[in-house]
Amino acid sequence: MQELGIDISRAILWFPNEASMPYVLVRVSAEHANSWITELRDAIRRCYITDELLQSRSQQLEGELQGTRESRQSQIINSKLPNPGSIMAGDFGEILAYFYLSSKAHPQIAFGPKKWRLKQDRTKPAPYSDVIQFVLPTWPMPSEDDKLLCAEVKLKSTNGTFSPIGAAISGCMDDRTSRLSKTLQWLKARAIGESLGVVQIAHLDRFINATDHPPVTKRFHAIAVVCSSLLDEEIQNIPIQASADFTLVVVSVPNLHDVYNAIFNAVKASTLPQEREL
């Protein structure tokens, strides 16, 4: 979260849990959801491109792209972001889940790859498991307290037949059986050729070669992000019994469609402060 510029103490307040079985219900307040337009703007931009890369690329393209420094940065940012529609919605759900998992791990530090930076095509979702994070309290020494957090995320902001809860559960089962392992291998291959930010190859190897270290805990999550106006209908699709294999989380966000579109519009219009230039 620090890499994204998010104050974890603020993020904790966004996601109040309501004790509920067989799932966890999180009701985001309208006040907090509306605050995300300004509070998450820079953080979500950094999910797609670091400030350092945005700055250096803007300088490199001076003379090649028309317009001011701000115009160049805007063009670079827009080259990374998804178009409005299902991919943008899915990305927002994944990023929100990333923030949620980090806040719930506190006071331990959870960190992970920003997979949205690794897309080959901005018009498609990032491949493999939606969100993974690591908790390594004694790093660089492996310990039995090490954890891997994994989440399959589905979002629903408008009326329709799509069931985000059922789809998140199904995807979570894929993570448990094989997809998480493939995700770690894919991330290692990417890490060899480029920086993954705070994630190092050694972090990935801790979980890829788990038998070479103390046992590790893997926690799987199926997370459905839904508009609060759809909540009562969607929770009818929740299984009667909780699963011992994963945690089902339903995040209710008021005016979800308007909120994530407003946030991405703010991201598109954002630029680095002048003093950040070298």
Image (cartoon, rainbow, N blue to C red):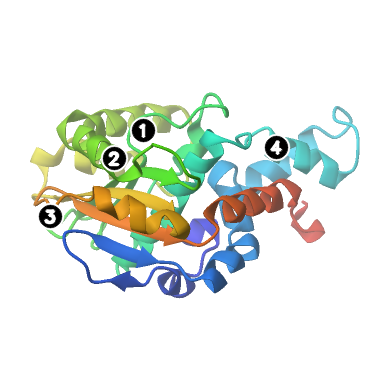
The answer to whether residue 220 shows anywhere in this view is yes
x and y percentages locating residue 267 in the rendered image: 67, 50
> Mark 1 near mark 2, Cβ–Cβ under 8 Å?
yes
Label 1 – label 3 distance at C-alpha = 31 Å
Label located before the other in sequence (4 or 2): 4
* Residue occupied by mark 4: 78
Q: Which mark is residue 242?
A: 3
Is residue 205 shown left or right of residue 10?
left
Assess disc 3: are there few (<14), some (14-19) or many (≥20) residues with their C-alpha within 10 Å of its C-alpha.
few
Label located before the other in sequence (3 or 4): 4
Label located before the other in sequence (1 or 3): 1
* Residue occupied by mark 2: 204
Tag 4: amino acid: Asn
Label located before the other in sequence (1 or 2): 1
Circle 3 SS class: loop
Position above or below: 85 against 12? above
Total numbered labels:
4
Circle 4 SS class: helix
Circle 2 SS class: helix
Label 3 – label 2 distance at C-alpha = 30 Å
The residue at the point 8 percent across, 49 percent down is 215
Is residue 169 shown left or right of residue 258?
left
* Residue occupied by mark 1: 187
Tag 2: amino acid: Leu
x and y percentages locating residue 119 in the rendered image: 51, 30
